[in-house]
């Protein structure tokens, strides 16, 4: 999945296996800190949008926007490379498991710095992190794909001062991203789980089939359990997910401090000509 329309093709069952995990939501909310307004970029179906903040969602896929729950924050069709919002109009940006889909990070950074006054919080994956058993033993091709699309953590430093925190994944994580099922290996054999993990979708079908056939065989004959005995009682795993919180560099054009915390209605921040669709 590499461009905006991809999730229109593959995202139709997203919410079946990608339910926001409340523990991850609490950590992301804490990372946003003391802000009032947030743009959720690559918002998908609205996971992790804080309900106590003034949120506007930006998302390129109509299919994803259509899965937002009733009562969710307003959503606008758009992308990170062209945020449909006014200059300096929100306190913070949130971007969860999306930055590896962005086609032009340089433009996205420029857009974030144009629109956002204070902070940008990303949930991303460190491409330099050691692999977990799935990408080490069964589908190493995912690591090659990820190396090509995941930005190294140093790339975030051009946005501002960066704080990186590991995000350990609970063994019963409700959000079915790549490593979410690290203690529930049979889940990876489920076609709906696979369909909602972009790395699986990006694999050659024959490569995916070979890796998953090997996993099925090892689950059936007990080799997986013997090789991963230590994981079976672990509560969380550091699988390489990182919260990257950037305090944006000040720019000459930023509004005076008096404007900085004024919470405007969501519709007032939207660039003229842009339309709420969700
Ligand atoms: C894995 S989903 C994550 C969705 C949501 N943030 C979540 O945590 O459930 C990735 C999302 O990034 C979106 N996306 C793809 N390219 C994008 C771009 N250039 N700008 C913004 N979002 C993009 C996709 O449409 C998709 O909704």
Image: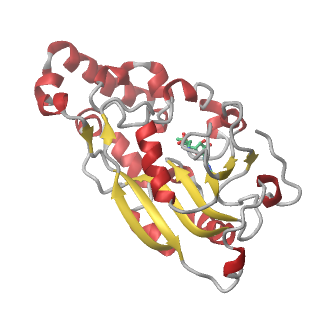
Query: Which residue is drawn at the image coordinates 32% and 36% (left, top)?
Result: 170
Q: In this view, does 42 lie above or below 211?
A: below
Q: In which quarter of the image is the N terminus?
A: top right
Identity of the residue furthest to the top in this view? 220
Q: Quadrant of the C terminus?
A: top right
Residue 219 figure quarter: top left
Identity of the residue furthest to the bottom in this view? 252
Q: In this view, does 121 lie above or below 69?
A: below
Q: Is residue 105 above or below residue 212?
A: below
How are the colours assigned in the image? Answer: secondary structure
**Drawn side of residue 240 relative to residue 40, left or right:** left
Q: Horizontal and vertical percent for residue 39?
A: 65, 55
Q: Horizontal and vertical percent for residue 19?
A: 51, 31
Residue 101 visible at all: yes
Residue 149 visible at all: no
Query: Which residue is drawn at the image coordinates 29% and 39% (left, top)?
Result: 135
Query: Which residue is drawn at the image coordinates 82% and 60% (left, top)?
Result: 271
State the residue in front, 261 or 69.
Answer: 261
State the residue in front, 261 or 18.
Answer: 261
Q: Horizontal and vertical percent for residue 197?
A: 47, 34
**Drawn side of residue 123 relative to residue 94, left or right:** left
Q: Number of labelled discs?
A: 0
| Image-quarter location of ligand 1 | top right
Query: Which residue is drawn at the image coordinates 50% and 27% (left, top)?
Result: 195
Residue 243 figure quarter: bottom left
Identity of the residue furthest to the right in this view? 273
């Amino acid at each position: 999945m590499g461009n905006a329309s991809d999730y229109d093709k593959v995202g139709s069952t997203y919410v079946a296996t990608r339910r926001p995990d409340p523990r991850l939501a609490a950590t992301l909310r804490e990372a946003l800190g003391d802000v009032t307004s947030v743009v959720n970029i690559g918002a998908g179906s609205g996971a992790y949008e804080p309900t106590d903040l003034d949120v506007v969602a930006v998302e390129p896929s109509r299919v994803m926007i259509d899965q937002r729950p009733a009562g969710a924050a307003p959503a606008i069709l758009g992308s990170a490379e062209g945020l449909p919002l006014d200059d300096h109009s929100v306190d913070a940006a949130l971007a969860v498991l999306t930055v590896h889909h962005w086609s032009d990070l340089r433009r996205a950074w420029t857009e974030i710095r144009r629109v956002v006054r204070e902070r940008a919080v990303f949930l991303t994956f460190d491409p330099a992190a050691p692999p977990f058993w799935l990408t080490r033993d069964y589908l190493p091709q995912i690591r090659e794909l990820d190396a090509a699309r995941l930005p190294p953590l140093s790339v975030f430093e051009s946005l501002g001062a960066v704080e990186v925190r590991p995000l350990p994944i609970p063994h019963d994580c409700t959000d079915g991203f790549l490593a979410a099922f690290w203690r529930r290996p049979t889940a990876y054999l489920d076609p709906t789980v696979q369909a909602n993990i972009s790395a699986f979708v990006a694999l050659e079908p024959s490569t995916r089939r070979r890796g998953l056939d090997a996993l099925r065989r090892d689950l059936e004959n007990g080799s997986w359990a013997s090789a991963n005995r230590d994981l079976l009682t672990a509560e969380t795993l550091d699988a390489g997910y990182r919260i990257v919180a950037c305090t944006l560099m000040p720019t000459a054009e930023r509004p005076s401090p008096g404007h900085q915390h004024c919470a405007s209605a969501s519709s007032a921040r939207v660039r003229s000509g842009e339309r709420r669709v969700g």
